Amino acid sequence: MSAPAGIRMLITRPQGRGEALQAKAAALGCQCELLPLLQILPGPDIKNAAQQLAKLCADDKVIATSQYALFALADTVTHWPSSETIAIGNATATHWQALGVNPTVPQHADSEGILMLPSLQPNAIAAKQVVILKGVGGRTLLEDELAQRGAIVHSFDLYRRQPHDNTSRLADILKQKRINTLLATSAELVELIDQVIPDNSAQKQALTLLVPSKRVKEIAQSLNFTNIINTQGASDDAVIRVLSEMTNTGNANG
């Protein structure tokens, strides 16, 4: 995948989640702007999730599909169960580690990658409790597949995403700052960006879109973005790895 000459990147992560990446990218020579497009607000299930976690046994499992699910529980759960914990990717794992938990991380940072873990196969998970920590409106693949494998699944909506007022500024920022690379770490962000950029426009064709997974890449392709790179995760390290390849070689694997 060809990289734009002179990376001018827009980071669209929620407020307070992009500054460290901005500094790291600047050290590579990238010009970076911050424009949060989503707000992360509390979901309805925080209390219920904490109560269920307290009931788990060592053989049970806890799956976090986003670091924001862990942020939501930070003030409620002070003692994590001894059950195996599974983080969808390195960004989520890093936050859990900061809470004193050392989670399992799948090879691929998505639900499909989680479902490939040996400890979640039918012969291992049948009749075990599985707690899924997620956001409102997230995918149901984990719940559906693990229930089919015989697990007793408890899914909790711990946060919700809401479009930020900044969305109205996106078109002007892209033009004024001559943005040629855009970081969108969720399907919701890709869809928001698509609403602002005219379909099949020269601007959409010129942008390099950095996305965290194969699934989000497929969504971006369905919305007629053409220059898309899968960073294989939403963590700073995953993004910096790709930016480094882009700045050093002019190419990155998409």
Image (cartoon, rainbow, N blue to C red):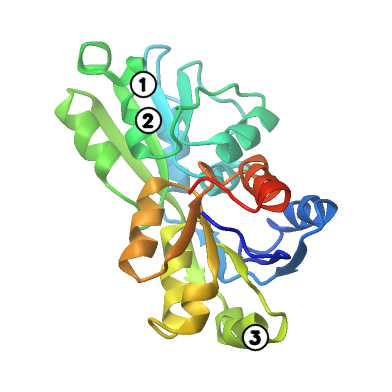
Camera-nearest label, 2 or 3: 3
Residue in the image at 45% along x and 27% along y: 106
Residue in the image at 47% along x and 57% along y: 186
| Mark 1 neighbour class, 10 Å CA radius: few under 14, some 14 to 19, many 20 or more | some
What amino acid is found at the position of numbered circle 1 in the picture? Leu
Residue 179: % across, % down: 66, 74
Residue in the image at 53% along x and 42% along y: 233
Query: Judging from the image, what secondary structure is the residue with disc 1 in?
Result: loop
Q: In the drawing, does residue 146 fall left or right of residue 246?
A: left
Furthest residue in direction right, as rendered: 27
Residue 195: % across, % down: 42, 80
Camera-nearest label, 3 or 1: 3
Instruction: Determine the image quadrant of residue 5.
Output: bottom right
Q: Identify whether 6 is placed above or below 175.
A: above
Q: Identify whether 54 is placed above or below 121.
A: below
Q: In the drawing, does residue 251 fall left or right of residue 218?
A: right
Instruction: Determine the image quadrant of residue 4.
Output: bottom right
Q: Which residue is mark 1?
A: 117
Q: Which residue is mark 3?
A: 175
Query: Judging from the image, what secondary structure is the residue with disc 3 in?
Result: helix
Q: Identify whether 131 is placed above or below 141.
A: above
Query: Between residues 196 and 175, which one lies in front from this camera angle?
Result: 175
The CA span between labels 3 and 1 is 44 Å
Q: Which numbered dot is residue 114?
A: 2
The reply to whether residue 93 is visible in this rendering is yes
Q: Earlier in the sequence, mark 3 or mark 1?
A: 1
Q: Identify whether 203 is placed above or below 74.
A: below
Residue 217: % across, % down: 40, 55
Instruction: Determine the image quadrant of residue 94.
Output: top right
Q: Are marks 2 and 1 in contact (CB under 8 Å)?
A: yes
